[in-house]
């Protein structure tokens, strides 16, 4: 929820707190998954299998096995319908893109990092009855926290990365791990159009303290808005941003509903 909160609080709330919002008499749309998100989930599947194998057995599955696992994941995601886009108009193109993206991960990312923990969930009390949870992609033996990103363009993710860092600090306390996160990075693997060559991954480093501050303030803001909404269920508790790139019916469950009439 953290990356999108300051883009449009109301859309974030509609996605995260559907049950509570509908219980107050508001209607929300049921959107199909988007192909951008589905390709991301599928590449993550292969990424997790590959790094887990490297961690547990010091070996890497064959590229074809990883691609097969990722495409299977995509088919499952698409089983109930899919919002395709111009970059990925159908399953055939998606499979080609996934194959190229997985191969890029295997060739350029896998050899560089030594995994300590792979795809693990962490949860912590955020106070006042709230819980804060997240799934962390990769923590390396030398203390680098890595989040794999896929998509059309590189975007900044300070609040989300800061959230992961805070969760990992909690994990460290719980498990008695001997080292701290010393660096935080995203690795961006582009979902390039089929007719273009696959771009190389882009590694971005972030300032740990800035990320943690961004996360902390977003969490406090979410808690405050949601607490107000539960006391007095008014959609205007959540700021709406119709200038957001995601202010479209296919991306926003509140679009055109009685929870938000700002989208055009
Ligand atoms: S319709 Fe637009 S402004 Fe309203 S919640 Fe959705 S993204 Fe935000």
Image (tube, rainbow, N blue to C red):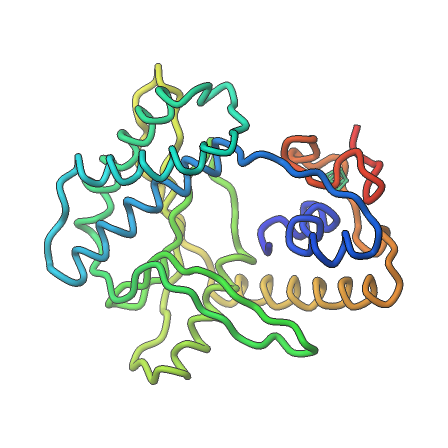
Depicted 244 relative to depicted 206: above or below: above
Horizontal and vertical percent for residue 33? 54, 36
Horizontal and vertical percent for residue 67? 24, 35
Depicted 160 relative to depicted 246: above or below: below
Q: Residue furthest top?
A: 195
Horizontal and vertical percent for residue 92? 35, 20
Q: Quadrant of the C terminus?
A: top right
Depicted 61 relative to depicted 211: above or below: above
Residue 193: image quadrant is top left
Q: Nearer the viewer, residue 59 or 148?
A: 59
Q: Residue at x 35, y 14 (%)?
A: 195
Q: Quadrant of the N terminus?
A: bottom right
Ligand 1 positioned in quadrant = top right
Q: Nearer the viewer, residue 201 or 77?
A: 77
Residue 226: image quadrant is bottom right
Would residue 161 appear left or right of 15 to someone viewing this image? left
Would residue 18 appear left or right of 62 to someone viewing this image? right
Depicted 29 relative to depicted 216: above or below: above
Q: Residue at x 78, y 56 (%)?
A: 23
Q: Nearer the viewer, residue 102 or 24?
A: 24
Horizontal and vertical percent for residue 114? 20, 60
């Amino acid at each position: 929820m953290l990356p999108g909160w300051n883009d449009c609080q109301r859309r974030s709330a509609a996605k995260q707190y559907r049950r509570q919002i509908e219980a107050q008499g508001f209607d929300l749309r049921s959107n199909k998954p988007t192909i951008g998100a589905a390709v991301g989930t599928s590449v993550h599947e292969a990424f997790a299998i590959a790094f887990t194998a490297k961690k547990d057995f010091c070996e890497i599955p064959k590229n074809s096995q990883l691609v097969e696992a990722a495409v299977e994941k995509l088919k499952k995601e698409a089983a109930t319908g899919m919002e395709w886009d111009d970059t990925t108009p159908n399953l055939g193109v998606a499979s080609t893109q996934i194959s190229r993206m997985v191969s890029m991960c295997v060739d350029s990312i896998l050899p560089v990092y030594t995994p300590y923990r792979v795809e693990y969930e962490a949860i912590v009390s955020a106070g006042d009855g709230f819980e804060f949870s997240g799934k962390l992609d990769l923590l390396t033996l030398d203390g680098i926290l890595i989040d794999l990103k896929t998509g059309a363009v590189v975007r900044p993710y300070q609040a989300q990365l800061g959230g992961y860092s805070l969760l990992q600090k909690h994990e460290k306390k719980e498990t008695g791990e001997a080292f701290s996160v010393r660096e935080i990075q995203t690795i961006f693997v582009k979902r390039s159009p089929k007719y273009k060559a696959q771009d190389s991954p882009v590694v971005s480093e972030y300032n740990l303290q800035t990320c943690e501050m961004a996360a902390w303030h977003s969490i406090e803001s979410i808690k405050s808005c949601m607490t107000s909404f539960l006391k007095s269920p008014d959609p205007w508790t959540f700021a709406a941003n119709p200038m957001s790139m995601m202010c479209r019916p296919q991306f926003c469950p509140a679009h055109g509903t009685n929870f938000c009439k700002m989208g055009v």
